[in-house]
Amino acid sequence: MSHKTQALIRLQSRYDGEEVVQELSAEVIVKGSDIYVRYEEPEKGPQGGTTRTTMKMTENRIKIIRHGEVQSEHSFQLGERLPGFYRSPYTTFNLSTHTTEMDMQLEGIYGHVSWAYDLYVYEDLSGQFAIHLHIQEELKS
């Protein structure tokens, strides 16, 4: 049985000294011990289309799945290098992530999740990223 609720998320990503912060409304779904955070990306895709992102969090793994104009899959597990892919109307490539840090501090569905990783496109290091996700209750007006 699953439980679904609306929440506010704050997603901070850092790459090469630049930080991007997004505050979004999200749907949080609990299925057993897994937590899913689903939201619509605010930026339009390369051809003006939309992309929906789902983050699946288990005890020690995070998986990010993007569907829509842009499609991709990334998985993160501390100390592991895991395969993924990226597809857009203009390009497709294989990638992998090597997770160097991971911290999950959730009480129920609310709290903080952060991780850092090296991103490889094919076998070449493309960059080092750090992500921080804060999930909080959506206030009713």
Image: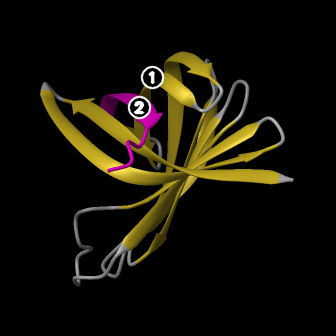
Q: Give the total of numbered labels.
A: 2
Q: Which residue is mark 2?
A: 133
Looking at the picture, does residue 42 appear above or below residue 28?
below
Which residue sits at x=59%, y=21%?
106
> Residue reaching furthest front?
141
Q: Amino acid at mark 1?
A: Ser
Tell me if I can see residue 86 in this picture: no
> Residue 114 has which mark?
1
Q: Quadrant of residue 62?
A: top right
Label 2 secondary element: strand
User: Mark 1–mark 2 contact, CB under 8 Å?
Assistant: yes
Expressed as whole percent of the image width and height from the top left, the position of residue 138 reads 41, 43
Point out the tag, 1 or 2, that comes first from the N-terminus: 1
Of 15 and 109, the residue lying toward us: 109
Mark 1: few/some/many CA within 10 Å (<14, 14-19, 20+): some
Task: Point out the stretch of residues depicted in magenta.
Answer: 127-141
